[in-house]
């Protein structure tokens, strides 16, 4: 079972968004049968079986084992992942394209970059899992409070300078092969440099955190305020 699976097929995405199937996927984090699931979700076993067949057809659940009980064979299934994300590939014709524009201060560009990250990392995870290899990634997650908008702008400027300095230091300056053409002196595989280095994607993101809803004050609290 994967920690996270990225769904690219539109039909699979549609199947996963059904509330009952979402609940079934949640329950199947641990292997279970249609009979066990029926008791948990409060539906007849026949209806649960219908949803299980749909999820299995789209590769979202898989058979773990079959248990013989008298004249009946009980199928034990499990979700293919603990969590799921729907890739922008599922909406390919209307998915945001970060190449259409580039604006470091645009929230829309940030969303386009995030969508591309989901798409690309999802494919990498699937490929690494199929090859039984570990995927080398790195991420930083933190929180920062800016006293003023000027501080935030200054931080963004310094961060940009620092990242650019690191890129200049470690970037392989050789030509990089991609869909746009073939570097002079040879034709290394797409995504590699002329020296054989692997091409990597770098994204640094900064955005405000969602505000936590505040609990309304009671009449007594308002009087004491």
Image (spheres, helix red, strand yellow):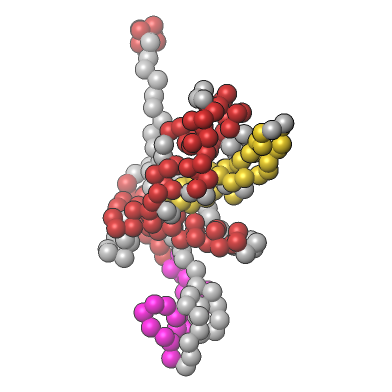
User: Could you say which is closer to the camera, residue 100 or residue 64?
Assistant: 64
Magenta part, dominant SS: loop
Asked if residue 171 is positioned above or below residue 50 in the image, the reply reads below
Residue 176 in magenta stretch: yes
**Residue under the point 33% across and 61% down:** 98
Given the current orientation, which residue lies at the most extreme front position? 71
The picture places residue 156, in percent across and down from the top left corner, at 38, 56
User: Could you say which is closer to the camera, residue 111 or residue 77?
Assistant: 77
User: Could you say which is closer to the camera, residue 79 or residue 220?
Assistant: 79
Question: Which quadrant is the C terminus positioned in?
Answer: top left
Q: Work out whether residue 179 can be spotted.
A: yes
Asked if residue 11 is positioned above or below residue 188 in the image, the reply reads above
**Residue under the point 38% across and 51% down:** 10
Given the current orientation, which residue lies at the most extreme bottom position? 185
The picture places residue 165, in percent across and down from the top left corner, at 46, 70
Question: How many numbered circles are shown?
Answer: 0
User: Could you say which is closer to the camera, residue 90 or residue 220?
Assistant: 90
Direction from residue 3 to residue 216 in the image, left or right:
left
The picture places residue 68, in percent across and down from the top left corner, at 71, 36
Give the image quarter of residue 75. top right
Direction from residue 59 to residue 221 in the image, left or right:
left
Magenta residues (range): 162-184
**Residue under the point 34% across and 44% down:** 148
The picture places residue 117, in percent across and down from the top left corner, at 44, 57
Direction from residue 198 to residue 10 in the image, left or right:
left
Q: Work out whether residue 141 can be spotted.
A: no
**Residue under the point 60% across and 61% down:** 130
Direction from residue 67 to residue 13 in the image, left or right:
left
Asked if residue 192 is positioned above or below residue 29 in the image, the reply reads below
Residue 4 in magenta stretch: no
């Amino acid at each position: 079972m994967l920690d996270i699976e990225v769904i690219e097929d539109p039909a699979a995405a549609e199947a996963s968004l059904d509330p009952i199937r979402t609940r079934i996927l949640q329950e199947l984090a641990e292997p279970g049968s249609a009979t066990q699931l029926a008791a948990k979700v409060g539906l007849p076993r026949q209806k649960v079986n219908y949803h299980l067949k749909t999820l299995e057809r789209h590769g979202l659940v898989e058979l773990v084992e079959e248990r013989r009980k008298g004249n009946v064979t009980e199928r034990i299934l499990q979700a293919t992942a603990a969590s799921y994300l729907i890739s922008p590939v599922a909406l390919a014709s209307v998915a945001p394209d970060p190449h259409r524009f580039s604006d470091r201060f645009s929230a829309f560009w940030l969303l386009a970059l995030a969508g591309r990250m989901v798409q690309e990392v999802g494919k990498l995870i699937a490929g690494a899992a199929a090859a039984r290899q570990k995927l080398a990634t790195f991420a930083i997650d933190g929180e920062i409070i800016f006293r003023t908008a000027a501080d935030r702008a200054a931080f963004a400027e310094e961060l940009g300078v620092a990242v650019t300095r690191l890129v200049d230091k470690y970037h392989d300056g050789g030509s990089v092969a991609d869909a746009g053409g073939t570097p002079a002196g040879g034709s290394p595989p797409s995504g590699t440099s002329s020296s054989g280095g692997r091409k990597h994607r770098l994204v640094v993101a900064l955005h405000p955190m969602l505000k936590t809803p505040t609990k309304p004050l009671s009449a007594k609290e308002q009087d004491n305020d």
